[in-house]
Image: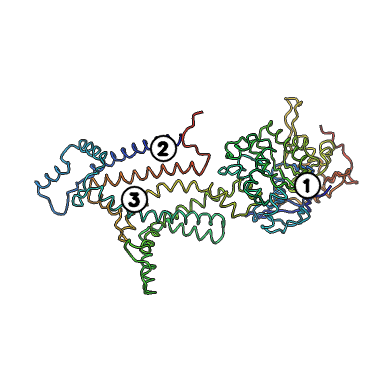
């Protein structure tokens, strides 16, 4: 399968009054056609910054790509000009955002918001673009498309608006679709509908999806591969199975452990990970999770672990996987 | 038709508002010490009596009030007690066109320039353009119009004349287009400043909204994002202040009209209070009040056109 996106050793910083906040510190991953990559991690770990950097949506300044490469459709876009980015955004890569309530322009009919993207990238007449917009609304299962296209966002429910956002993102058949917490602001039944819709679209159009979320349930149901991010770094990547059944990084295990389950005894308290993530103004030299890790060793605080490969396609940055490390009983937490 | 119903309702309220305004002005006026006929020279007792009888001032205040209201309904605002018995309606209809002409020019200029400056300041936030336009705004808010007016007269009126020998901007008068530029600009300065500050704040808020990010993620250029997505959403606060600004600017600007010798309504407004010209005070206050109430109604209707979320009338389901 073709690689549609390759991110190599990406560093993104924000210049603030307090100093340089290193939000993303050497992230690498790639994405193949029709693949769903989930990026998970707690708030502030750099998931969204990574995603928005792929489209260069972060306001620069204060954001700054310090180093790294983003190869989208065989082209490095790190140094692409704003004009070049305008051709890429919405066409090669598009994005749906977390809160559908605020993502649509409240004073523009949704039909017009759809045709705008279509006409920007494809040379279509107003009429053709409108037809295309109606077709897209049908794909995302919005009834009465003709009437609906004339309506304003406030006449749509949250789930409907997210469907409109998806329609908009798909309008020019992008190679990569970034879904930045697409279901966080929706209630559970609608969440399932939206995820089903995304799945269906992926199967139909073979669009690669980067799914950013902290909902591990969504990850399990949808993704082919998972990247776990912590403090601006990807600490573990693997297939969904690797991550859920054979997690090898203590942070991944802690995340999974803090997931409540339906058959849990009500008297059992929910588990949380003790401590707080490191301050990215002064990120630690060693493993960023060391201060919260129950298996932390001397070396963890001194030196960032390299990536170990416990099995095929499964990478994990943890000293515990070093061959000289005494093997503790891992994976037996639950 | 909900909108028609809404407008009728609002017009009724407007009528009530103006009536209350009329009553308040009428009685408060009478509470002022003195009367319209006090002058430097003492007026003989008999003359004063005759004058009071002529204007109905010898009757009890409450009777006077109802007589006045009755006349107002007939479209008669009484005759001036100061300007040689001229009917107030005549004075207003003669002076208002000048004030309106001046006001509408400065209003249009202030709105367009204010909005543009606000947009530039917001989009180029933190740059020299932002600083410059906000400096202009601070000057506009804090420097009174008579100083701006005089400066314009001195620099652009007199200075340019001395420099070129051609009278480009006349120093006073209200005749051809050129003579209208300086007064309209002097009058528009403070409104322009207010509007540009509001527009900047509102624009900054809108530019940080998610739907702007959505527009950017579609690949739209910054120009398109600003004009198609941001401005319409950011303009609401400006529309809100436009009502009162319009009413204030259109019904006569005393200072600017005075400096540039424009025969508008401003001087009648100010003079009427100085000489306690009862009928003139009531007449002009009601005129201004009506204007303000109507301007606000238009503003509220404009909301509905600009923002589809604004429902003017309660829709019964």
Question: What is the chain letter for disc 2?
Answer: B
Question: Residue at (48%, 50%) from the top-left corner?
Answer: B198
- Provide the secondary structure element on which disc 2 rests: helix
Give the residue pinned by disc 1: A234
Q: Position of residue B267 (x, y in %)?
A: 28, 54
Q: Helix or strand or loop: what does disc 3 sit on? A: loop
Q: Is residue B77 left or right of residue A110?
A: left
Residue A202 image-quadrant placement: top right
- The x and y percentages for residue A110 are 60, 42
Q: Position of residue A233 (x, y in %)?
A: 76, 48
Tag 1, which chain? A
Q: Which residue is mark 3?
A: B251
Please report whichever mark, 3 or 2, sits nearer to the chain's N-terminal start.
2
Q: Label 3 to label 1, Cα distance in Å?
A: 67 Å
Circle 3 Cα neighbour tier, 10 Å, few/some/many (<14 / 14–19 / ≥20): many
Residue located at (56% from left, 48% from top): B206
Return the chain for callout 3. Answer: B
Q: Are marks 3 and 1 in contact (CB under 8 Å)?
A: no
Question: Is B42 or A91 nearer to us in this picture?
Answer: A91
Residue shown at the point (58%, 42%) measured from the top left? A109
The reply to whether discs 2 and 1 touch (Cβ–Cβ < 8 Å) is no
In this view, the residue in front, A300 or B202, is: B202
Vertical placement of residue B25 versus B171, above or below: above
Marks 2 and 1: which is nearer the front? Answer: 2
Q: Are marks 3 and 2 in contact (CB under 8 Å)?
A: no
- Residue A330: image quadrant is top right
Label 2 environment density (alpha carbons within 10 Å; few <14, some 14–19, many ≥20): some
- Residue B7, disc: 2
Are discs 2 and 1 located on one and the same chain?
no
């Amino acid at each position: 399968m073709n690689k549609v996106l390759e991110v190599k050793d990406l560093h993104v910083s924000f210049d603030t009054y307090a100093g340089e906040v290193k939000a993303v510190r050497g992230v690498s991953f790639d994405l193949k056609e029709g693949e769903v990559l989930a990026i998970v991690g707690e708030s502030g770990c750099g998931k969204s910054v990574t995603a928005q950097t792929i489209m260069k949506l972060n306001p620069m300044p204060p954001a700054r790509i310090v180093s790294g490469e983003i190869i989208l459709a065989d082209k490095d876009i790190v140094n692409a000009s704003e004009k070049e980015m305008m051709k890429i955004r919405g066409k090669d890569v598009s994005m749906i955002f977390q809160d559908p309530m605020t993502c649509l322009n409240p004073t523009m009919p949704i039909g017009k918001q759809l045709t705008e993207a279509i006409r920007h990238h494809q040379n279509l007449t107003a009429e053709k673009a409108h037809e295309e917009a109606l077709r897209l609304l049908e794909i995302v299962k919005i009834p009465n498309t003709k009437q609906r296209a004339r309506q304003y966002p406030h006449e749509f429910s949250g789930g409907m608006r997210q469907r409109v956002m998806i329609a908009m993102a798909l309008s020019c058949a992008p190679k990569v679709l970034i879904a930045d917490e697409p279901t966080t602001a929706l209630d559970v039944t609608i969440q399932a509908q939206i995820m089903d819709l995304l799945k269906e679209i992926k199967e139909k159009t073979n669009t690669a999806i980067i799914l950013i979320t902290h909902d591990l349930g969504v990850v399990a149901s949808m993704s082919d591969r998972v990247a776990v991010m912590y403090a601006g770094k990807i600490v573990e990547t693997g297939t969904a199975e690797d991550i859920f059944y054979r997690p090898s990084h203590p942070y991944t295990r802690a995340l999974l452990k803090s997931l409540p389950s339906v058959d849990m005894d009500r008297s059992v308290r929910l588990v949380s990970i003790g401590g707080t993530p490191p301050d990215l103004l002064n990120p630690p030299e060693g493993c960023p999770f060391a201060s919260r890790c129950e298996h932390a060793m001397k070396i963890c605080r001194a030196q960032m672990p390299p990536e170990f490969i416990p099995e095929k396609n499964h990478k994990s940055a943890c000293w515990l996987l070093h061959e000289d490390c005494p093997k503790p009983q891992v994976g037996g937490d639950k | 038709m909900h909108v028609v119903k809404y407008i009728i309702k609002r017009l009724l309220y407007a009528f009530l508002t103006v009536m209350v305004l009329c009553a308040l002005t009428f009685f408060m006026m009478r509470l002022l010490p003195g009367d319209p006929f006090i002058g430097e020279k003492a007026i003989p007792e008999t003359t004063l009596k005759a004058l009071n009888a002529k204007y109905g001032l010898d009757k009890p205040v409450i009777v006077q009030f109802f007589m006045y209201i009755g006349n107002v309904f007939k479209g008669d605002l009484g005759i001036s007690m100061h300007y040689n018995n001229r009917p107030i309606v005549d004075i207003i209809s003669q002076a208002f066109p000048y004030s309106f002409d001046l006001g509408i020019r400065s209003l249009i200029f202030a709105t367009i320039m204010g909005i543009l400056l606000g947009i530039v300041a917001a989009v180029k936030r933190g740059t020299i353009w932002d600083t410059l336009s906000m400096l202009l705004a601070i000057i506009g808010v804090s420097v009174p119009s008579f100083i701006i007016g005089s400066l314009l007269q001195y620099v652009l009126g007199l200075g340019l004349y001395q420099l070129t020998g051609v009278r480009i901007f006349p120093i006073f008068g209200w005749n051809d287009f050129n003579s209208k530029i300086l007064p309209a600009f002097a009058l528009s300065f403070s409104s322009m400043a207010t509007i540009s500050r509001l527009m900047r704040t509102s624009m900054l808020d809108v530019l940080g909204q998610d739907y702007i990010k959505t527009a950017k993620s579609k690949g739209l250029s910054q120009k398109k994002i600003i004009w198609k997505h941001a401005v319409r959403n950011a303009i609401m606060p400006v529309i809100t202040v436009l009502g009162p600004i319009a009413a204030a600017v259109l019904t006569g600007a005393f200072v600017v009209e005075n400096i540039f010798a424009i025969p508008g309504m401003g001087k009648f407004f100010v003079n009427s209070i100085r000489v306690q010209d009862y009928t003139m005070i009531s007449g002009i206050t009601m005129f201004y009040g009506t204007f303000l109430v109507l301007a606000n109604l238009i503003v509220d209707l404009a909301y509905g056109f600009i923002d589809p979320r604004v429902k003017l009338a309660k829709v019964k389901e």
